[in-house]
Image (tube, rainbow, N blue to C red):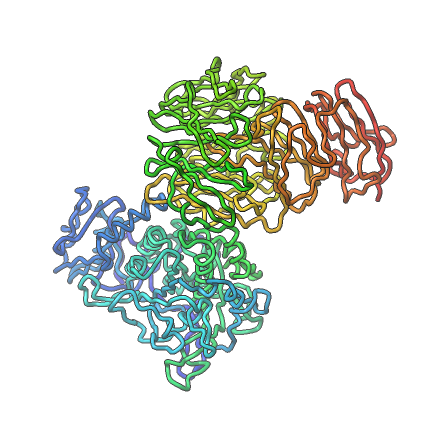
Amino acid sequence: MKTLPNVLIGTIFITALCACVAVADGSMDCTSLNCINLNGINLETVNPNDITPPPPYSCENDLVEIMFKKDARVRLRGGTPVDLNAANALIGIDQVLSRVSWSEWRRICDVSEELIDELTAQGEAVSGNELYNPNNMYRLRIGSGPDIWEICRDLESCPGIHRARPVPKPMILPLPGNYESSQGYLRPATSAPAGINADWAWTQPGGDGSGINVCDLEYSWNFLHNDLFNNFGGILNLYSSDPMNDDNHGTAVLGIFGSENNSWGTKGIAYGSSIKACGTFYGTYMGDPNPTWNVPGAIVAAASASGIYPGDVLLLEHQWDLTGGNGFVPIEFWTDTYPNQTYNGVYSSIEWAIAVKDVHVIECAGNGGINMDLLNWYGDSGAIIVGAGGAYAGGTYTEGDLQRLSFSSYGARVDCQGWGEDVVTTGYGYLYNAEGSNYYYTNSFSGTSSAAPVVAGAAASCAGYWKANVSSRFSMHPIYLRRILKTTGTPQVTPPSGNIGPRPDLAGAIPRLSEWKDVTASPLNDTRGFGNWGDYDNDGDEDLYVANSPYVSNKLFRNDGGGVFTDVTTTLLGDMQGYAGGAVWGDYDNDGDIDLYIGNNGNNNNILFRNNGDGSFSDATTWPINCGFYGYRPTWVDYDNDGRIDLYVAFSGQANKLYHNDGGGAFSDATIGPEGDTGNTAHAAWSDYDNDGDMDLYLVEMGVPNKMLRNDNGVFTDITTPPLSCVGSHQACCGDYDNDGDQDIYLVDGNYGVPNILLRNDGNFAFTDITAAPLDDTDHCSMATCVDVENDGDLDIYLINNQERSRIYLNDGSGNFVEDTHGLFMWEDYTTTNAWADYDNDGDLDTYFGVTFPANSNTLAQNNSAGGRHYLQVKLAGAASNACGIGARVRIVTGRGIQVREIKADRLQQSLIAHFGLGSETLVTSLQVFWPGGTVQESLMVAADQQITILEKVSSGAGESVQPLSTKLYPNAPNPFRATTPTLIRYDLRQSAPVSLMIYDLAGRRVKSLLSGIEQAPGSHPIHWDGRDDYGHQVAPGVYFYRLNAGAYRESRRMLLMR
């Protein structure tokens, strides 16, 4: 054999089949099944650096696949490549080709250049990634001359060429076995062997794959099979042929997911889908008459086809021999050799197809038994890689149900498993062959070839359900579907070791899809920009005002209930001049209905609209709040606690302004201190950071350090210290993430590569950076909101990444966050803002997220993720304080601890109703409202699952009281008590004081410090004790004393802990 050039020494090998092969008498020859050793070396344990490079793979001796570099723009003009970017991409090529008798250039596929360019641009805009443009990929036919590998080496040394490899000859597909079984893969996941619950999915709308196309990329089909004929939607590329001269393999694959529901033969997992095919061995592309193996071109052709839509499924029924010794791995290792994956034609085409068409790509892991954790992966192409799992203990193979079959390649990158043995499907005729090949059935289809279509069918079922029930506007994001199939499936059984992932369980996956639903309908689907919720007509449901982007007018939508919104925009409210960058609801005149202030992003004046109480609005703008010049970040806040909300406006390019509400519709400029900052404020984050009863101000600045301003009775002092003084932030999201009673801060950084940070409030304006993954996001973030998405009592984070996909980080209650982004939120449609409210009054928070890109529109997403968890909603009606209770702090106590919410009204305004998720709790033992005016009210034993209104200083239920007249310690309840039912200790404070509350045993020894010198505000305070000491150990049953020290007040009481 010829010695090969060094540049290719690690990238060449021989192809071979590693599967069971049917022989003439119907038996199986499995002699080559376990051929996973190379020269006697076990590939599962081999050091990749010690392996001897294998010989070349079997290839076409006159055809080269060429990938020009990613930044090139090489196009064929008159049969000759032309460098349209004039970037020297063609240097040296003519010199290399002068050594062959002739050469002929062909494009990788016959999809038009214009369409591929358009789709590539769209894919890059959506994914935020630079994609490889398939127009830069070519096939080069060459005449006689040097060895083709030598030509490839020389071409690859040319500066403009990324990769040059001989076109491989087709590899034999992962062939089936010849053993009996039934269609058990359709049955419930709890059955033995475990199915994927397809029969349950068929009871759900769209669960049969209706509306979805599934395209099989391979060869060897019989499209005339009578159990496939009516579902067959056509072949996407012409002139494909079968190098194996067999019409069974593809037929068997199609039958698993696509055979008809006709009460005879087999029944496909996604029988409602449309079957399509795209041959990977074809000719006459761009005039080439000779069929060759062209997997990259087939992927591009399929994704570009007019009959393939977002949400459809592409199935890659191929494998690649990475070792030259039947070491089969996924086809995305195309033209690579052990142990390295490169940015090759198939990998880049998969990535391209997912980005440009949002298709779900399913890929065989391969029948090589390779430990793929030993391989050097280039990256994540986005495909769902499928391994082969067993179905029967003692069946065809020794492994049992859900175990990895020995021939299946495996590793961390394998996502899911399908049935890898004894699959009943169309083709081959081993089960039935009496009426000819159009009625062939087998009961022995096996390998990753049978496993992958099982997962493809599950994917089509999920995609069909999504389209019918979740959103017809947005397809299901491929990364989301992959995560759902992995996290809801039936777990793999070990041993043997080697990950092939769970088996899909549609009864687990489909309910997860419906946790959110796109309910956007006219007129909400014709808007862009910032949404703000507020019940302007006081009818009990949240209405919506949308501040326009530069492309459309502002809109007011009245919520009529039942998911119906009516556009009630008047000329006054809608015909704004300029670009309205923000709007805030608040009752500035305390007349019982909310008014609206609009901040303009431009030189036009801001506007105050007074709500007339009859559904109409009047322009109430007066000097000085008619400010202009980019004063588009307004906030309502009662900074001096005088019972009227004031107005703070953050400007771009000039000093911020604080406008005092003087009553009677008059405002005056009260800016006298650091609140008049000139640092180009991106966000003014008002919150009572020190729990002293007045709203402090954290200024998030663009390009200069942020500032913390402490409010002392209306006077502001800059007390900024690290880490609050960080630079480059875009927005601050405030909330009590750890449920310790004070407001923490999540800082969103708007710069690529700079992480967001989470700052824990330790009291007295001391903050600690406790950022950990995944909150250290480094994408181009625009904003975040803190909200209890799933009603479990912990504040989660919804992060908007503008041109990248948005994310939901769920708070597990122990200081950890986990990404659990629903597919509805993963589309990169230039989302810039979102607003949360329970628009349908069902007890969980829904969201309206806004976009600014003119081709898109805003979306209303309905939350169905609470899963039966309980809630409480609190609406405030101020008397001495402002009517909306803006600036009030609402604190609840349940058996799981405390929660605190603040009522705010800024440019990123959420609902003015405080929402508490309660998890499994059905009773709130204490509800306290700390009003801006200083009043503290408490309601005891409030039932869950309702919205209540608290009237300031007016009783709204049994047990409610105003601020206590004296400091007092109450008897605990229940008493006696058991550790399984914690006892409630309650005390009143007449005035603020440092509080200590200790538990002692009969010998006077302290066993538990519940509070130690904590400064607390006046009011009634509850706290629970569960019978554990300071070390978390359960104390012995018996008599204990609890002692309260509050300033000069001292009192002790006795309680009995029972066994």
In the displayed structure image, the side of residue 1042 where residue 213 appears, left or right: left
In the displayed structure image, the side of residue 810 where residue 298 appears, left or right: left
Q: Residue at coordinates 48% horizontally, 51% vertically from top-left?
A: 517
Q: Position of residue 609 (x, y in %)?
A: 44, 29
Q: Residue furthest front?
A: 614
In the displayed structure image, the side of residue 990 where residue 736 appears, left or right: left
Q: Position of residue 831 (x, y in %)?
A: 40, 40
Q: Tell me where residue 448 sits by quadrant.
A: bottom left
Q: Nearer the viewer, residue 658 or 686?
A: 658
The quadrant of the picture occupied by the N terminus is bottom left
Q: Residue at coordinates 64% horizontally, 22% vertically from top-left?
A: 934
The quadrant of the picture occupied by the C terminus is top right
Q: Position of residue 978 (x, y in %)?
A: 80, 43
Q: Nearer the viewer, residue 907 or 66?
A: 907
Q: Tell me where residue 349 sits by quadrant.
A: bottom left
Q: Nearer the viewer, residue 119 or 377?
A: 119
Is residue 49 something that shows in the picture?
no
For residue 323, above or below residue 184: above
For residue 879, above or below residue 463: above
Q: Residue furthest bottom?
A: 434
For residue 1057, above or below residue 76: above
Q: Position of residue 21 (x, y in %)?
A: 41, 75
